[in-house]
Image (tube, rainbow, N blue to C red):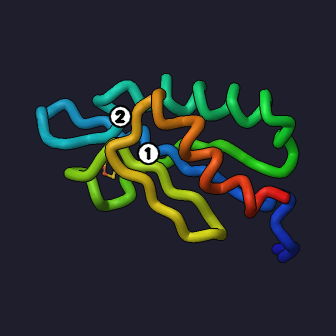
């Protein structure tokens, strides 16, 4: 194993966990569209290589979803929609450099 500094300044985790039993799950709420919108907006801002948008499994706060977690700045966004993408990115912009 090798350990090294992260190649990204900021990593955005979009929960895409799905459940078929009708219970709360971010992925049941079109999260892949949200992830794609975030990726496109990150690219449009010229942040590619500094900001990584990834999808995750359940992050444990399903009732608040759709959830997005941003590390290492420790921000958590809940109830996120595609319309929130510009505001979300504006909030993390100071950490992107
Ligand atoms: S399903 Fe997204 S936090 Fe649990």
Which residue is denoted by mark 1 in the rendering?
Answer: 15
Q: Is mark 2 within 8 Å of ligand 1?
A: yes
Which residue is denoted by mark 2 in the rendering?
Answer: 27
Count of number-bearing discs: 2
Question: For residue 17, which quarter of the picture?
Answer: top left
Tag 2 near tag 1, CB within 8 Å: yes
Residue depicted at 39% across the width and 48% down the height:
67
Q: Is mark 1 within 8 Å of ligand 1?
A: yes
Q: Is residue 23 left or right of residue 1?
A: left
Residue 72, percent from left and from top: 65, 69
Determine whether 24 is above or below 43 in the image.
below
Element marked by disc 2: helix
Q: CA distance from mark 2 to mark 1?
A: 7 Å
Residue 62, percent from left and from top: 26, 52
Q: Is residue 32 shown to the viewer in this render?
A: no
Residue depicted at 46% across the width and 28% down the height:
83
Determine whether 47 is above or below 94 in the image.
above
Question: For residue 8, which quarter of the picture?
Answer: bottom right
Residue depicted at 49% across the width and 30% down the height:
34
Mark seen at residue 32: none
Q: Is residue 19 shown to the viewer in this render?
A: yes
In the foreground, 42 or 54: 42
Q: Quadrant of the N terminus?
A: bottom right
Going from the N terminus, do you reach mark 2 or mark 1 first?
1
Element marked by disc 1: strand
Q: Is residue 79 left or right of residue 50?
A: left
Question: For residue 80, which quarter of the picture?
Answer: top left
Determine whether 51 is above or below 9 in the image.
above
């Amino acid at each position: 194993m090798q350990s090294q500094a992260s190649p990204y300044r900021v990593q955005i985790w979009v929960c895409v966990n799905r459940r078929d039993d009708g219970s709360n799950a971010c992925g049941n709420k079109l999260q892949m569209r949200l992830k794609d919108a975030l990726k496109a907006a990150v690219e449009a801002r010229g942040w590619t290589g500094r900001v990584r948008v990834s999808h995750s499994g359940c992050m444990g706060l399903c009732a608040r979803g759709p959830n997005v977690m941003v590390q290492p700045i420790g921000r958590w966004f809940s109830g996120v929609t595609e319309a929130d993408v510009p505001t979300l990115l504006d909030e993390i912009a100071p950490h992107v450099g």
